[in-house]
Image (cartoon, rainbow, N blue to C red):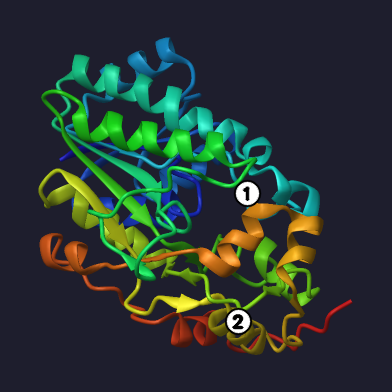
C-alpha cells in the first residue's frame, strides 16, 4: 500500500516507518526540517518537508503521494524540553502547537485525504489522563472522557476530542484513533537522558498524596507495532494502545527510580502539589484512570511485546550507571 506518515521522524514515527517499509509498503514520511530527510531515506521512505498547519502545502503533498492510508503522528513535543513546575501548571501553553496539530492539522489532512481518495486515516490520541475521573480505575474505549479537566488543560482536552470526533466521523474514510498510553523507551521522555527520567533522577516528580491515580504505559516499539497493525486491519473506531499492566502512581514511579538506580521519589501532600505545580499533576497522581487494551488485542491482532512496564523499565535502563540526584 501507499502510506503517508506525518511526524515520521518523531519518537513513534521513527519506529513506525521501518516497520511499514519492511512490510513492503511504499511510504512517504513528512518532517518539518530538511536536516531529517536523510533519516527517512535511510528508513526506506520518500521524505517530504511539510508543515501540517499549512493547508495548501498539505493538499499538494497528499495529492502527490496519493496515499491509500494516512497515519497522523505529528506533534510539536520533544523529550529534551525542560518541564518544570511552572509548565505543569498550564499544559495548554506547552502543548499549544500540538493542540493546533491535533485540531487544524487533522482537519487539513482529512480534507486533503478526501480529495485524494484516501481510504483509511489513523491518528494519534492519548489515554494517559483524559478519561473521566469516575468509577473504576481502568477504562475502556466506551467510557467517557473528562468533562471538567483541571484548569490549564482545557485546550489540550478539547484538541484531543476534536481529533477523535473528526477522524471517526469523516465521511468515506475508515477513521481509526489510537489512544496511546504513556510512552517509554528510545526517543521518549522515559529513557536515559529523557525529560521525565531526568525529573525522576532529580527527585522533581513526586508521588502526590495517596498516589492512587492509575496510569497505563506502553513501550514505544509496541506502540509502533500496534500502529502498523491498524494500518492494515481493524474496524473504524477508537482503540486503547497500552500494556497489560495499569498501575498506580505510587507503584510505577518508585519502580522507575529503582530501575534507573536513582533515589526514591519524594512524597508530598496534595495541597503542596497543587500550590507548586498546579491541579493537573495533583489530579493525575491521585485521580487519573488507566486504559484497558482488550479491544486492540482482539480486533487488531496485536500483542504488546512488553506486557508490563516492570520488565520494560528494567530493559530500558539496563547497564546504565546509577543516576544520583543533584
Q: Distance between the residues labelled 2 and 1?
A: 20 Å
- Residue 311's label in the rendered image is none
Can you give x and y, in whole percent of width and height, for residue 114 in the image?
A: 20, 19
Residue at 40% over, 56% down: 127
Where 6 falls versus 313 (above or below)?
Answer: above
The quarter of the rendered structure image containing the N terminus is top left
Q: Which mark is in front, 2 or 1?
A: 2
Of marks 2 and 1, which one's residue comes earlier in the chain? Answer: 1
Residue on which the image places disc 1: 78
Residue at 11% over, 52% down: 233
From this viewpoint, which residue is outermost toward the top? 56
Given residues 16 and 254, the one toward you in this image is: 254
Can you give x and y, in whole percent of width and height, for residue 59 in the image?
A: 34, 14
Judged left or right of residue 275, residue 53 is left
Given residues 135 and 237, the one toward you in this image is: 135
Residue at 37% over, 45% down: 124
The quarter of the rendered structure image containing the C terminus is bottom right
**Mark 2: few/some/many CA within 10 Å (<14, 14-19, 20+):** many
Can you give x and y, in whole percent of width and height, for residue 107 in the image?
A: 35, 22
Q: In which quarter of the image is residue 2?
A: top left
Q: Quadrant of residue 294?
A: bottom left
Helix, strand or loop for disc 2:
helix
Residue 33 seen: no
Residue at 56% over, 76% down: 249
Residue on which the image places disc 2: 256
Where 108 falls versus 245 (above or below)?
Answer: above
Helix, strand or loop for disc 1:
loop
Residue 24 seen: yes
Where 159 falls versus 52 (above or below)?
Answer: below
Amino acid at each position: 500500500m501507499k502510506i503517508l506518515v506525518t511526524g515520521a521522524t518523531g519518537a513513534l514515527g521513527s519506529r513506525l516507518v521501518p516497520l511499514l517499509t519492511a512490510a513492503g509498503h511504499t511510504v512517504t514520511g513528512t518532517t518539518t526540517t530538511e536536516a531529517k530527510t536523510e533519516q527517512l531515506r535511510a528508513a526506506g521512505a520518500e521524505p517530504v518537508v511539510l508543515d501540517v498547519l499549512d493547508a495548501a502545502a498539505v493538499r499538494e503533498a497528499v495529492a502527490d503521494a496519493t496515499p491509500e492510508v494516512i497515519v497522523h503522528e505529528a506533534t510539536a513535543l520533544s523529550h529534551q524540553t525542560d518541564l518544570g513546575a511552572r509548565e505543569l501548571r498550564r499544559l495548554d501553553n506547552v502543548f499549544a502547537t500540538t493542540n493546533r496539530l491535533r485540531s487544524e492539522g487533522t482537519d487539513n489532512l482529512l480534507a486533503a485525504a478526501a480529495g485524494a481518495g484516501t481510504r483509511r486515516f489513523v491518528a494519534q490520541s492519548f489515554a494517559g489522563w483524559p478519561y473521566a475521573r469516575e468509577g473504576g480505575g481502568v477504562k475502556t474505549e466506551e467510557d467517557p472522557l473528562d468533562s471538567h479537566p483541571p484548569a490549564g488543560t482545557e485546550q489540550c482536552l478539547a484538541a484531543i476530542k476534536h481529533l477523535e470526533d473528526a477522524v471517526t466521523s469523516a465521511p468515506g474514510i475508515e477513521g481509526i484513533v489510537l489512544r496511546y498510553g504513556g510512552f517509554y523507551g528510545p526517543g521518549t521522555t522515559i529513557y536515559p537522558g529523557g525529560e521525565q527520567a531526568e525529573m525522576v533522577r532529580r527527585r522533581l516528580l513526586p508521588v502526590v498524596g495517596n498516589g492512587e491515580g492509575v496510569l497505563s504505559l506502553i513501550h514505544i516499539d509496541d506502540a509502533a507495532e500496534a500502529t502498523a497493525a491498524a494500518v492494515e486491519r481493524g474496524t473504524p473506531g477508537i482503540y486503547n494502545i497500552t500494556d497489560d499492566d495499569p498501575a498506580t502512581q505510587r507503584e510505577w514511579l518508585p519502580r522507575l527510580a529503582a530501575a534507573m538506580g536513582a533515589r526514591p521519589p519524594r512524597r508530598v501532600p496534595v495541597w503542596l502539589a497543587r500550590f507548586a505545580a498546579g491541579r493537573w499533576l495533583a489530579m493525575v497522581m491521585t485521580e487519573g484512570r488507566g486504559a484497558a487494551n482488550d479491544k486492540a488485542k482482539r480486533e487488531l491482532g496485536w500483542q504488546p511485546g512488553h506486557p508490563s512496564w516492570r520488565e520494560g523499565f528494567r530493559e530500558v535502563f539496563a547497564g546504565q550507571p546509577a543516576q544520583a540526584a543533584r
